[in-house]
Image (cartoon, rainbow, N blue to C red):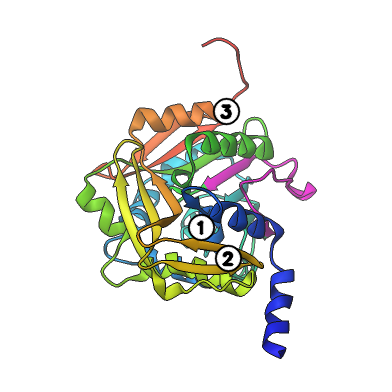
Amino acid sequence: MLKQEAEDGQASLADPQFRSDVLTGLALPQRAIPARWFYDRRGSELFEGITALPEYYPTRTEIAILRDVCSALAARVPAGAAVVEFGSGSSTKTPLLLGCLAPAAYLPVDISGDFLRESAGRIAADFPGVQVTPIEADFTRPLKLPPAVADLPKLGFFPGSTIGNMLAVGAVDLLRSMRASLGDAALLLIGIDRIKPVEVLIPAYDDAQGVTAAFNLNLLHRINRELGGTIPVDAFRHRALWNDDRARIEMHLEASRDVAFEVDGRPFSIGAGETIHTENSHKYGPRDARLLLRGGGWTPVAEWTDAEDKFALILAEAQPERSAP
């Protein structure tokens, strides 16, 4: 009885948008849940583990590029800027960026509050001359920055190719939202993952140690814990596949048997072989990436990549909009 009351209490405290997205997504013909809900505390910890895996090239490649272009970046970003990092996670790349620049303020934005505050505390300790202001928020929604940074030049930092998790229309909307949050003349440093051979891509999202599988399955554990779910997690397995038509890796949770369960008191059933689509990771060619940025109101002004062209860092500027080329 006490256990049930505790579970009911947790469900009542769940994020209303999480509840809505899960209930809506599980009712779709192709069941789907937005990837942003991976990142509870456990999910954030697992993702940090993924970034250290030998198969997962994006993090180490992006870090190497960032080290190589430090002086070039510093020459383009005004001293005394406010660096706003969207989806900061553990901020592993942030010390490199802040060390390159001479910022006045750092504002990490993330949906996982505990993880955010811990990483912000480490940054504040390492950079005592920088004003660190963590913002617990869903960065895919409009963001109002604190008045203290209103008059500072802005640099948005969006590493890790997180933009690839979104469909094109959502990616453009997000870029426009970032432009509105940061303002005219702001800069944006964004990571973009390149299209590459499938034999490189698939292992990056289906590693031999099973860390990515645990990351994917943790979403079901979160639903059970926060939304009073009764999903039999052991009935699902992680799947990663390349969708060539859409130029993306897809992650799914596939039912290994027929299952019936409840979430927030609502009944659902999934047949063997059916999936819950949990993440996309779109890959872009150079022209595609530039077109995406321009569609979001950003003009690319510099671009850097690794020797194998696996990954790119693009610096873009929020230039005044114009109606003609």
What residue is shown with label 1? 94
What's the distance in space between the residues labelled 3 and 2, CA to CA? Answer: 30 Å
What secondary structure predominates along the stretch shown in magenta?
A: loop
> Label for residue 123?
2
Q: Badge 2: few (under 14), some or many (20 or more) residues near its Cα, within 10 Å?
A: many
Q: Residue at x 29, y 47 (%)?
A: 242
Q: Earlier in the sequence, mark 3 or mark 1?
A: 1
Q: Amino acid at mark 2?
A: Ile
Q: Nearer the viewer, mark 3 or mark 1?
A: 3
Instruction: Please identify the quarter of the rendering in which residue 77 is found.
Output: top right
Q: Earlier in the sequence, mark 3 or mark 2?
A: 2
What residue is shown with label 3? 297
Q: Amino acid at mark 3?
A: Gly
Which range of residues does the magenta coloring cover?
135-157
Q: Outermost residue, bottom direction? A: 2
Quarter of the rendering occupied by the N terminus: bottom right
Local secondary structure at mark 2: helix
Q: Residue at x 57, y 44 (%)?
A: 156
Instruction: Please identify the quarter of the rendering in which residue 126 is found.
Output: bottom right
Q: Position of residue 258 (x, y in %)?
A: 41, 66
Q: Earlier in the sequence, mark 1 or mark 2?
A: 1
Kindly indicate whether the residue at mark 2 contacts the one at mark 1 (C-beta within 8 angstroms): yes
Instruction: Examine the rendered structure and indicate whether residue 132 appears above or below residue 101.
Output: below
In-front residue for pair 161/71: 161
Kindly indicate whether the residue at mark 2 contacts the one at mark 3 (C-beta within 8 angstroms): no
Instruction: Examine the rendered structure and indicate whether residue 325 appears above or below residue 190.
Output: above
